[in-house]
Image: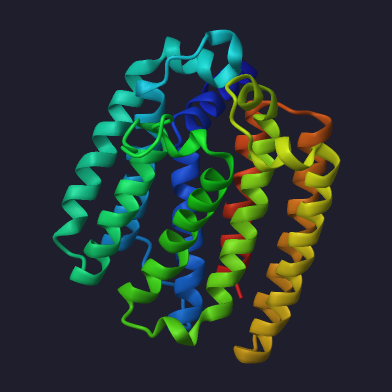
Amino acid sequence: MLKRLATIFTDWILYTSLFAACCTVALCMATERLLIGQLPAFFSPLHLFVLGSTLLVYNTHYVVKRSSPQVSDRVSWSQHHVYWHYIFFTIGFVSCIGSLFFLSWQILEACVVLGILSFAYSLPLLPFARKKRIKDFGWIKITVLTGVWTIVTSVLPIIYWHKNITDYPYEILLRFVFMFTLCVAFDIRDMQTDLEADIFTLPNIIGLRNSYVLMNGTLLLFAFLSVVQYLRYPSPARLTGELLSVLLTKAAILYTKKYPSDKAYLGYVDGMMLVYGLLCMIY
């Protein structure tokens, strides 16, 4: 009975993207910890916006998606529990609208661009090509996705706290490299379905083996940038957390390579955002 309840809860928190939304907030708070030198308040307009926008964008994707249930466990769950996507879509929408009244104009301007890019990822909004969604263009897909995650979790906190972006170049680079690694992992998960849809993502172009080599390289780059940032903002504990994040992310990638499943990717690969955020917050 307990195992059944645990499975139901795990499916719910992963497949509604509530877990991903919490991971996003954790990354924001990790950046804020660096900016202000202390833990930020958990409840803030920025966190409400980040949480709500993640729920809004990801649940929109599964509200409009019309794949066969056989594609994945997540698609099957979504089609049998589509009402949850509508519920979290509504929660996300209300959270975004409510938080906008407390955010600066600089953040609102950035949000317009981020919103367009986020919705164009899943919805046919591109007017200049036969394929109308960003996700249908492999190279653009990973660049836009990584860029949006980077801006939301590093640039927006810098703007929110009225800091100068040029003072934190390595925090932004660290976030981009980290999110790029996770995006490559998810592209590996979707290699077959993307190929069948004529979407040539990075793993489909360079091959599976080279994709794992690439992720090894980006994790090493992340470790190097962590050391460089340490020289700029010395904190042995934060550096330790970042280097530990490298090892744990590598372990998550190896686990999903051996045991590929939606739950493994959403729980362990996405979960590295939460781990990275928490490790940076506790120093």
The residue under the point 46% across, 85% down is: 166
Looking at the rendering, which quadrant does residue 87 occupy?
A: top left
Residue 91 or residue 213, whichever sits in front: 213
How are the colours assigned in the image?
rainbow
Q: Residue at x 69, y 23 (%)?
A: 192
Does 165 sit left or right of 259 as displayed? left
Q: Please say whether residue 172 is visible from this viewpoint.
A: yes
Give x and y (percent) for residue 277: 56, 61
Residue 38, relative to residue 51: is it above or below?
below
Which residue reaches farthest left? 101
Asked whether residue 1 appears in the rendered view, the answer is no
Locate the N terminus by quadrant.
top right
Residue at image location 84% in from the left, 32% down from the top: 258
Q: Quadrant of residue 193?
A: top right
Residue 274 x, y percent position in the rendering: 57, 53
How many numbered badges does the structure rendering display? 0
Question: Residue 183 or 124: which is nearer the viewer?
Answer: 124
Instruction: Work out whether 57 lies above or below 84.
Output: below
Q: Position of residue 217 (x, y in %)?
A: 80, 60
* The C terminus sits in image quarter: bottom right
Quadrant of the rendered image containing residue 35? bottom left
Please report the residue visible at 59 percent of the width from the left and 30 percent of the height from the top: 199
Judge left or right: residue 162 versus residue 28: left
Q: Is residue 257 left or right of residue 197?
A: right
Q: x%, y% of residue 98?
A: 17, 51
Closer to the camera in the image, 97 or 210: 210
